[in-house]
Image (cartoon, rainbow, N blue to C red):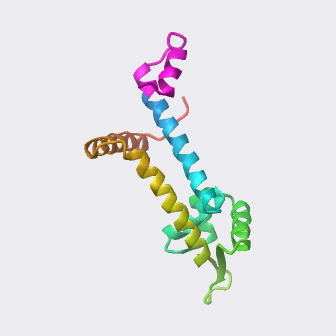
Amino acid sequence: MEDSVDRHLARWRGKAPYDEQVEAIVTRMQMLVKHLRATKEASVAGAGLQYFEYDTLHRLVAHGGSATPTELAEELMLSPAGMTGRLDTLEGSGLIRRVRSTTDRRRVDIEITDKGHDLWMEAMSVQGDVETALISTLSPTDRTTLNTLLKHLLTQAESHPPTPH
């Protein structure tokens, strides 16, 4: 069965110096990441969220429903101004609320609202169904093997951060 990467390799065969098997593996991983990102964006949109809203709510849920703007900005790799704009939008939609600390008036915590949590849960449910459908084409043994291989590759990548050549 031919896929888009087979066609990509055929177009480039003999035109550039590369290991075809390495190119096939890397390009398939890149295509799967693009596919998963597109399905996640569609799932999120189906729940009535924009991706940046979902991503911020996702981080809040991971923090137990509450975090500081600084914590969120660091995790989302946003500037303080970018984070403020994002939080303004989410607050205006009723998905989060800003809560002043009772002990330190300079501190503001961001809390997910019930509405925000419900929308996040809806998006997560749809996304989970999409991911399960994709992976269901693999046998349990193949899932274990793929997971082991991907973990091995990721461990290698994480232990050697990119450096300019």
Asked whether the viewer can see residue 112, the reply is no
Q: Residue 88, located in which quarter of the rendered image?
A: bottom right
Front position in the image: 30 or 40: 40
Q: Which residues are magenta?
A: 1-24
Front position in the image: 117 or 26: 117
Query: Is residue 116 in the magenta section?
Result: no
Q: Residue 96, located in which quarter of the rendered image?
A: bottom right
Which residue does the image show at 35% across and 45% down from the upper left? 151
Q: Position of residue 35 (x, y in %)?
A: 53, 42
Which residue does the image show at 40% across and 43% down from the upper left? 154
Q: Position of residue 156 (x, y in %)?
A: 38, 40
Front position in the image: 119 or 111: 119
**Depicted 163 relative to depicted 61: above or below:** above
Q: Relative to residue 115, is residue 88 drawn left or right? A: right
Give the position of the C terminus as an image quadrant.
top right
Front position in the image: 9 or 22: 9
Give the position of the N terminus as an image quadrant.
top left
Q: Position of residue 76 (x, y in %)?
A: 60, 58
**Depicted 42 relative to depicted 82: above or below:** above
